Image (cartoon, helix red, strand yellow):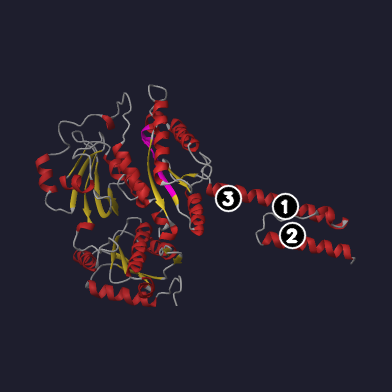
């Protein structure tokens, strides 16, 4: 083998090694190869070019929204990783298109897409060179600005919104285009978490939406009609029921007209516009925590469409103070008759006002858990229980302080709510132990949720510049009937947790 051929082989091997290490800029000088290796070198370059193109297409599909060509939710998450790695402060704006559903229902989805793209263009034109815009849902955008402060970004968006309304008013477009927004400053090194990235901005956006409604001209649909003279049920009876408990809020919704009736307590505690608002589903969803909203919207759509007649979920709702309260909602759809419309009736329980609420996580405490198990025992119902233990909380408390330990527990509780998708009742049992109680799911469904909890529970928490991933243990218990004392069941869960393998996290030793 001559020296030229050997050097050529070494060049090809080095080129392949760089590609294997992810060096996308790796190059191979085919002209410098000996004649007998040129064909191999050219084929390798062609193959790499094809693979690179396919990878870029796959990546584009994974991180790019197909309608707007903006980054999607996954793209935002990937960019957030970069922001937290850099640790520099930035401003985040949460933006929601006003009345997109009305546009789709009234003018069709083609016009709805045009509406989305018009908002997208308006937002893009107001961006600074370093800003990035993401479409994270059907009508939801997030704008991230590394250089603009909160007040400046608010002024920019307000000007854009005003110009957009003016450009589409007076019959210049099928409907007046507008959006609502909220801005917040985020500082990763100050301890802000990825979960908090849009939370404050989202809360401000919904307050803005409630205060800056755009009146559409010539509205004829039921959602914009004046409030009816008579509420959808006997007012005196409804108020008698609604005043029976400070933590319970009955409601009635006429699915045919959009009329609804809510208790005085609900109006007071959740800042509702009145006891008889229209568009009450949209109004209520506007107050649901952004991380819970998609699941709640999906289930309520099934009730409205008549696919489901029973709805039960546990999720967070913003109260009058601007804080999220843990609520438990049970509702039933009543199909129409010759004399009655389609109705959705139910009751919402504000668990955050009860004495049995854990102050750190907002979940039910050990007393609420014992009561729930005892209630299931009285009716002899089957149950699925998932127990979760956050290990090393004592070490976190010792190293970073008790506030840090509480943050780990609060973050874990929020992630637990995401994984349970509102299907179960959630409790902080004792110390770092949580219990999710399911009474309507098959064992296979409960096991699937337990597996999801094991994969995703324990979101990283920042303590200054230190990122901590809590180690956890997960155990599941299936009961054909709850025929034992709650304490006996909880002791069995603790034993199962001790035997469960640990999902490792950050070591603090």
Numbered label attached to residue 59 = 3
Please name the residue that numbered disc 1 is placed on: 47
Please name the residue that numbered disc 2 is placed on: 15
- Residue 161, compared with residue 371, is above or below; it is above
Of label 3 and label 2, which has the lower sequence position? 2
Spatial CA span between label 3 and label 2: 23 Å
> Is label 2 in a helix, a strand or a loop?
helix
**Is 507 situated left or right of 17 in this image?**
left
**Is 424 situated left or right of 355 in this image?**
right
- Residue 118 at x, y percent in the picture: 46, 32
Magenta region includes residue 407: no
Residue at 42% across, 30% down? 163
Magenta part of the chain: 91-102
| Badge 3 density bin: few <14, some 14–19, many ≥20, Cα 10 Å | few
Quadrant of the rendered structure where residue 29 is? bottom right
- Residue 109, compared with residue 495, is above or below; it is above
Q: Nearer the viewer, residue 43 or 98?
A: 98
Mark in the foreground, 1 or 3: 3
| Badge 2 density bin: few <14, some 14–19, many ≥20, Cα 10 Å | some
- Residue 479 at x, y percent in the picture: 30, 68
Of label 1 and label 3, which has the lower sequence position? 1
Q: Do labels 3 and 2 touch, CB within 8 Å? A: no
Residue at 28% across, 76% down? 491
Residue 186 seen from this side: yes
Of label 2 and label 1, which has the lower sequence position? 2
Q: Nearer the viewer, residue 459 or 241?
A: 459
Q: In which quarter of the image is the C terminus?
A: bottom left
């Amino acid at each position: 083998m001559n020296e030229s051929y050997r050097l050529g082989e070494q060049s090809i091997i080095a080129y392949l090694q760089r590609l294997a290490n992810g060096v996308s800029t790796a190059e191979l000088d085919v002209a410098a190869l000996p004649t007998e290796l040129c064909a191999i070198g050219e084929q390798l370059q062609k193959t790499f070019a094809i693979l690179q193109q396919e990878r870029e297409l796959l990546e584009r599909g994974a991180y790019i929204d197909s309608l707007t060509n903006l980054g999607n939710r996954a793209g935002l998450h990937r960019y957030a990783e970069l922001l937290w790695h850099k640790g520099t402060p930035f401003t985040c704006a949460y933006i929601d298109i006003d009345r997109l559903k009305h546009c789709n229902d009234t003018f069709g989805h083609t016009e709805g897409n045009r509406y989305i793209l018009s908002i997208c263009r308006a937002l893009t034109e107001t961006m600074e060179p370093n800003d990035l815009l993401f479409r994270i849902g059907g009508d939801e955008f997030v704008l991230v600005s590394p250089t603009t402060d909160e007040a400046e970004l608010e002024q920019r968006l307000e000007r854009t919104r005003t110009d957009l309304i003016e450009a589409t008013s007076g019959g210049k477009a099928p409907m007046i285009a507008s959006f609502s927004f909220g801005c917040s400053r985020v500082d990763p090194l100050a301890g802000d978490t990825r979960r908090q990235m849009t939370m404050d901005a989202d809360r401000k956006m919904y307050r803005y939406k409630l205060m800056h409604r755009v009146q559409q001209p010539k509205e004829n649909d039921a959602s914009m009609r004046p409030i009816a003279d008579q509420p959808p049920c006997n007012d005196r009876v409804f108020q008698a029921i609604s005043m029976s408990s400070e933590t319970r809020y009955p409601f009635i919704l006429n699915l045919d007209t959009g009329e609804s009736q809510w208790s005085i307590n609900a109006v007071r505690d959740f800042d509702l516009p009145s006891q008889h608002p229209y568009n009450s589903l949209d109004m209520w969803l506007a107050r649901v925590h952004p991380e819970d909203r998609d699941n709640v919207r999906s289930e309520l759509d099934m009730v409205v469409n008549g696919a489901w007649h029973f709805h039960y979920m546990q999720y967070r709702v913003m109260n009058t103070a601007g804080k999220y309260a843990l609520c438990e909602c049970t509702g039933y759809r009543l199909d129409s008759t010759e004399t009655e419309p389609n109705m959705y009736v139910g009751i919402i329980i504000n668990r955050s006002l009860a004495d049995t609420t854990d102050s750190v996580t907002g979940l039910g405490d050990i007393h609420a858990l014992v009561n729930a198990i005892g209630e299931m025992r009285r009716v002899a119902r089957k149950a699925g229980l998932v127990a979760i233990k956050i290990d090393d909380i004592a070490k976190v408390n010792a190293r970073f302080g008790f506030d840090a330990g509480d943050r780990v527990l609060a973050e874990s509780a929020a992630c637990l709510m995401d994984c349970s998708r509102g299907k179960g009742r959630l409790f902080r049992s004792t110390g770092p132990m949580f219990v999710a109680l399911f009474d309507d799911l098959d064992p296979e469904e409960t096991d699937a949720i337990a597996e999801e909890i094991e994969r995703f529970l324990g979101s990283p928490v920042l303590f200054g510049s230190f990122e901590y991933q809590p180690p956890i243990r997960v155990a599941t218990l299936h009961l054909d009937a709850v025929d034992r004392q709650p304490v006996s069941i909880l002791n069995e869960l603790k034993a199962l947790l001790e035997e469960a393998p640990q999902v490792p996290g950050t070591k603090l030793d």
